[in-house]
């Protein structure tokens, strides 16, 4: 059934109440205006931990809720409506997935309780160039004694500026462009030779460029299998893509709702502008697109719950569709708001800025349309 | 869950044993679709056997009650049956306006006698129905229809004309919107009646379309006598039934377009016709980019149809005004599909006659799709409904 079950619907209600109360768009403005270096509010993150959100994907016997991807996506969607900055995607979704699926007992014991408690932030470092290209990983991990030495640069690492550890993809064999030969490492953010440069970004959340200059790690820091990390990396990225798609769906829904409110309130030429058919049809078309994106997102989250390794197509459909629909929603929101939509005084522009970041991360609409076409035989 | 698993196993076994192998191949033309009716000539023995076996089980209309010739299946069971039929490539045993439109209307609004009389014959494919809705001066503004049904004592006398009546020349019966009160506001003077197309005074004239085909007719009524027992629902409240049926129709038209070409998408068709590069990418890069976006939209749209149906089932209600979302998006998507298919065809798509191209099947189908966003309510009317009813935007 492509609908939320009772537990999921209750979680949605609770999440909406929480973010509306504790993390409205004003909270993002404060992060921006006070130039909070980490890009999010630590107290809010701990409050999310108290709600159980940080452990939503951590199995129950590891201290989490084991609630599944639909639940995690619901939280992303609700945070998308309020533009809530948090390390939920990087840490509670992507890192928790990597650790619970492939972490060693020691890694799990060390990191999972810290994630659940809201004490640890773990970033995932994949991309090295202007576009998203996991198989294009070129960064070298050279064997060195019993361990490895990492050298190279990772760009636009989400939450890298606040991370306690970094899940990093590096090449132990093969060459850039090949899926084989990639290994994943869980590296302490304070490791010698690792330089973190904070990037100030469009969405005020920040990100980081990480430079590894011969960073030494041991065999115990490998997560998953050496040379064969691409499959795990794709699952972790799939989880991130689905989370972003859900967030973009929430972003689009909120842009849309605010625009509808404006159409019903603003008067020009002696009438409410929402009575003009030219605007009604734009609004109605946008509504259809938003509805269709929502369906694709729920289908992807359910596919992840059913079998995360087989969810690639559904996730790419969702990320492609949600990225393009959130873009349309942001553009239409500004246009239908008119001049006021261009001002920093109202929030519409903030939705557009976050849309641009979230739609670009982990593959934009073109990247995922290409994947969909390949998966469908063309 | 266990009982659904068991249902799936039994269904799979039954279909495997009872669906003739000839009925497991893709539909290649109009006459591969079984419409039934008094004058139906089966294309093959397999087509006849397949209809009879499915009808005996009630599976031509699996969701209808068994008392009226249906299968009495739940929403989940109907979905499973469709999935299992798709898995073996089974053709639909019977398509008809009776199944899509009149049946649901009678189940919701018909008298017990009307249900007993008409539903089993629809389920068995014995009577073929057509729909008398649009008129020359009542298209998008359907409620302004002028075909009149005057009181003749124990019967109505129907006079007027309809247009765009699908397959009126092949139908046995018509369900028809007529005006029974000319003094009331336009929505409150309409009634929904049933009559025989062989009744004296009924005539039809096929309309030649740009595709070269004539699936639609003009239909004329000259003093046709219709027994009053053939009134469905309440006199002058036929618009309620019309609206209910339009919702159904919109859902159906919106969901169409997946059945042709064996369910293959334009990108997939293009890959087989044009070829792919070493990495499996369609060789025409411009076409591929557009086809890929259409593929994303088609898959997301399919999820939306599933979601709306599941939401309706979970809420115990119909899809309602959201059928306008499906109708608008689905038909616009289908037009995009055929634009892409024509681009894939290139020069091949320019041939109008000749065995090699099945008499220009591709361009004729392409032209046919241009009606998708007109019939059953234009895209603009759908957007109006979304704006007014779903978004509550104000009237001008």
Image (spheres, coloured by chain):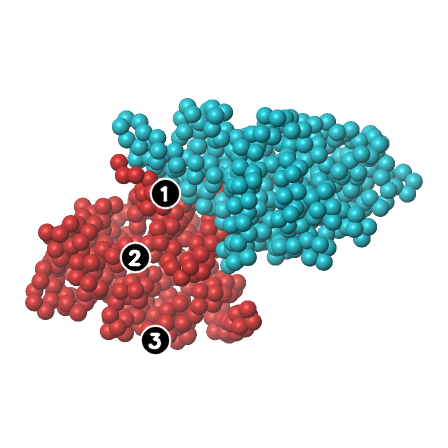
Looking at the image, tell me whether mark 2 or mark 3 is earlier in sequence order. 3
Instruction: Mark 3 vs mark 1: tell me if same chain.
Output: yes
| Quadrant assignment for the N terminus of chain B | bottom right
Relative to residue A249, is residue A51 drawn left or right? right
Disc 3 is placed on an element classified as helix
Q: Nearer the viewer, residue B182 or A268?
A: A268
Q: Nearer the viewer, residue A250 or A311?
A: A250
Q: In the rendered structure, find residue B245 and report the number of the disc placed on it.
A: 2
Q: Looking at the image, is mark 1 or mark 2 earlier in the sequence? A: 2
Q: Which chain is cyan?
A: A
Q: Position of residue B302 (x, y in %)?
A: 47, 51
The chain letter under disc 2 is: B
User: CA gap, disc 1 to disc 2?
Assistant: 22 Å
Mark toward the viewer: 3 or 1? 1
The reply to whether residue B212 is visible in this rendering is no
Question: Callout 3: residue from which chain?
Answer: B
**Relative to residue B263, is residue B290 depicted above or below?**
above
Mark 3 vs 1: CB contact within 8 A:
no
**Which chain is painted in red?**
B
- Where residue A87 appears, as percent x and y from the top left, is 65, 39
The circle on residue A114 is none
Q: Viewer-proximal residue, B138 or A235?
A: A235
| Residue occupied by mark 3 | B67
**Alpha-carbon neighbours of circle 1 within 10 Å: few (<14), some, or many (≥20)?**
some
Q: Residue at x 26, y 65 (%)?
A: B109
Q: CA distance from mark 3 to mark 1?
A: 40 Å
Locate the C terminus of chain B and report the quarter of the image it occupies: top left
Q: Disc 1 on helix, strand or loop?
A: loop
Q: Residue at x 52, y 58 (%)?
A: A6
């Amino acid at each position: 059934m492509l609908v939320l079950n009772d537990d999921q619907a209750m979680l949605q209600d609770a999440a909406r109440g929480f973010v509306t109360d504790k993390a409205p768009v004003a909270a993002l403005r404060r992060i921006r205006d006070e130039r909070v270096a980490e890009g999010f509010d630590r107290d809010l993150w701990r409050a999310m931990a108290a709600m159980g959100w940080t452990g939503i994907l951590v199995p129950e016997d590891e201290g989490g809720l084991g609630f599944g991807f639909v639940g995690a996506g619901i939280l992303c969607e609700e945070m998308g409506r309020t533009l809530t900055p948090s390390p939920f995607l990087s840490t509670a979704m992507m890192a928790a997935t990597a650790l619970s699926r492939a972490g060693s007992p020691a890694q799990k014991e060390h990191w999972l309780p810290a994630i659940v408690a809201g004490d640890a932030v773990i970033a995932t470092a994949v991309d090295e160039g202007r576009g998203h290209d996991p198989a294009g990983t070129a960064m070298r991990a050279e064997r060195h004694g019993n361990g490895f030495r990492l050298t190279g640069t990772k760009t636009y690492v989400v939450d890298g500026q606040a991370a306690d550890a970094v899940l990093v993809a590096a090449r132990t064999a093969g060459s850039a462009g090949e899926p084989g030969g990639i290994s994943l490492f869980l590296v302490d953010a304070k490791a010698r030779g690792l330089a973190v440069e904070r990037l100030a970004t469009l969405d005020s959340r920040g990100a980081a460029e990480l430079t590894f200059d011969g960073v030494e790690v041991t065999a115990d820091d490998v997560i998953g299998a050496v040379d064969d990390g691409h499959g795990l990396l794709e699952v972790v990225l799939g989880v991130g893509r689905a989370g972003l798609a859900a967030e973009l769906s929430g972003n689009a829904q909120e842009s849309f709702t605010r625009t509808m409110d404006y159409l019903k309130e603003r008067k020009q030429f002696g009438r409410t502008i929402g009575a003009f058919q030219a605007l009604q049809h734009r609004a109605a078309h946008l509504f259809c697109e938003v509805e269709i994106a929502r369906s694709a997102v729920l289908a992807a989250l359910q596919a992840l719950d059913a079998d995360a390794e087989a969810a690639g197509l559904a996730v790419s459909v969702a990320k492609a569709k949600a990225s393009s629909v959130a873009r349309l929603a942001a553009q239409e929101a500004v246009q239908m708001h008119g001049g006021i939509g261009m001002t920093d005084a109202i929030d519409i522009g903030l939705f557009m800025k976050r849309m641009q970041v979230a739609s670009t991360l982990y593959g934009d609409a073109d990247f995922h349309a290409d994947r969909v076409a390949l998966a469908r035989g063309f | 869950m266990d009982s659904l698993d068991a249902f799936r196993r039994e269904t799979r076994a039954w279909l495997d044993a009872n669906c003739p192998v000839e009925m497991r191949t893709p539909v290649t033309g109009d006459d591969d679709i079984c419409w039934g009716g008094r004058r139906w000539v089966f294309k093959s023995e397999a087509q006849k056997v397949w209809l009879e076996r499915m009808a005996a089980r009630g599976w031509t209309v699996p969701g209808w009650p068994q008392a009226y010739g249906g299968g009495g299946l739940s929403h989940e069971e109907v979905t499973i049956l469709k999935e299992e039929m798709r898995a073996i490539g089974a053709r639909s045993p019977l398509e008809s306006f009776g199944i899509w439109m009149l049946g649901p209307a009678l189940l919701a609004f018909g008298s017990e006698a009307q249900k007993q009389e008409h539903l089993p014959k629809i389920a068995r494919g014995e009577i073929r129905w057509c729909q008398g809705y649009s008129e020359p001066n009542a298209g998008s503004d359907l409620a302004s229809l002028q075909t009149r049904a005057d009181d003749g004592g124990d019967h109505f006398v129907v006079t007027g004309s309809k247009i765009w009546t699908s397959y009126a020349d092949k139908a046995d019966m018509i369900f028809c919107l007529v005006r029974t009160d000319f003094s009331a506001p336009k929505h409150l003077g309409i009634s929904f009646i049933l009559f025989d197309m062989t009744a004296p005074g009924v005539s039809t004239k096929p309309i030649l379309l740009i595709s070269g085909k004539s699936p639609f007719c003009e239909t004329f009524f000259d003093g046709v006598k219709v027994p009053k027992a053939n009134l469905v629902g309440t006199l002058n409240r036929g618009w309620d039934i019309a609206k209910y049926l339009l919702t159904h129709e919109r859902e159906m038209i919106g969901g169409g377009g997946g059945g042709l070409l064996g369910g293959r998408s334009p990108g997939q068709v293009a890959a087989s016709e044009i070829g792919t590069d070493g990495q499996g990418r369609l060789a025409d890069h411009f076409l591929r980019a557009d086809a890929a976006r259409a593929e994303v939209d088609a898959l997301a749209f399919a999820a939306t149809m599933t979601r709306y149906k599941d939401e309706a089932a979970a809420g115990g209600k119909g899809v309602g005004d959201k059928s306008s979302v499906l109708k608008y998006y689905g038909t616009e998507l289908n037009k995009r599909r055929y634009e892409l298919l024509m681009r894939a065809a290139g020069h091949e798509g320019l041939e109008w006659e000749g065995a090699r191209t099945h008499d220009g099947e591709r361009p004729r189908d392409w032209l046919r799709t241009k009606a998708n966003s007109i019939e059953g309510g234009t895209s603009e009317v759908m957007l109006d409904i979304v704006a007014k009813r779903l978004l509550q935007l104000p009237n001008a």
